[in-house]
Amino acid sequence: MSHSTVTVNKTTVFDYDAEFSLLDSMEENQVPANYNCRGGYCGLCKIKLTQGQVTWVQDSLVSLDADEVLACCCVPDGPISIEM
Ligand code: FES
């Protein structure tokens, strides 16, 4: 998988570049994302995944609801929709 789209809050859509974390890709596309540690510790990058799947590339040390993911720790696995 090298190309996916990310839909943010049902309005903004950008192409995800597979070399980056979802957080990096959001920043690259001027989507204002909260973050601090970029390592799965602080939980500030928590977003809701409303459609699609992600692959975790770092472990999360934050407790998450079933529909929540950490943008710094995952990459889209196909087209996804997120809310924040
Ligand atoms: S930036 Fe801290 S958990 Fe993602």
Image: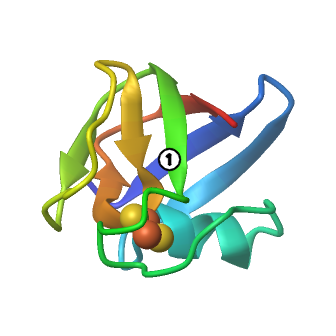
* Image quarter in which the C terminus is found: top right
Asked whether mark 1 lies closer than 8 Å to ligand 1, one says yes
Above or below, 55 relative to 58: above
Q: Quadrant of residue 26?
A: bottom right
Is residue 28 rendered to the left or right of residue 66?
A: right
Residue 12 placed where, x, y %? 83, 40
Above or below, 30 relative to 13: below
Residue 14 placed where, x, y %? 70, 52
Which residue type does callout 1 highlight?
Lys
Residue 45 placed where, x, y %? 53, 58
Kind of element beneath mark 1: strand
- Tell me the residue at 55%/59% (across/down): 44
Above or below, 66 relative to 12: above
Label 1, residues with CA under 10 Å away: few <14, some 14-19, many ≥20 = many
The residue indicated by pointer 1 is 46
In front of the other: 72 or 65: 65
- Tell me the residue at 20%/48% (across/down): 55
Of the four image quadrants, the one with ligand 1 is bottom left
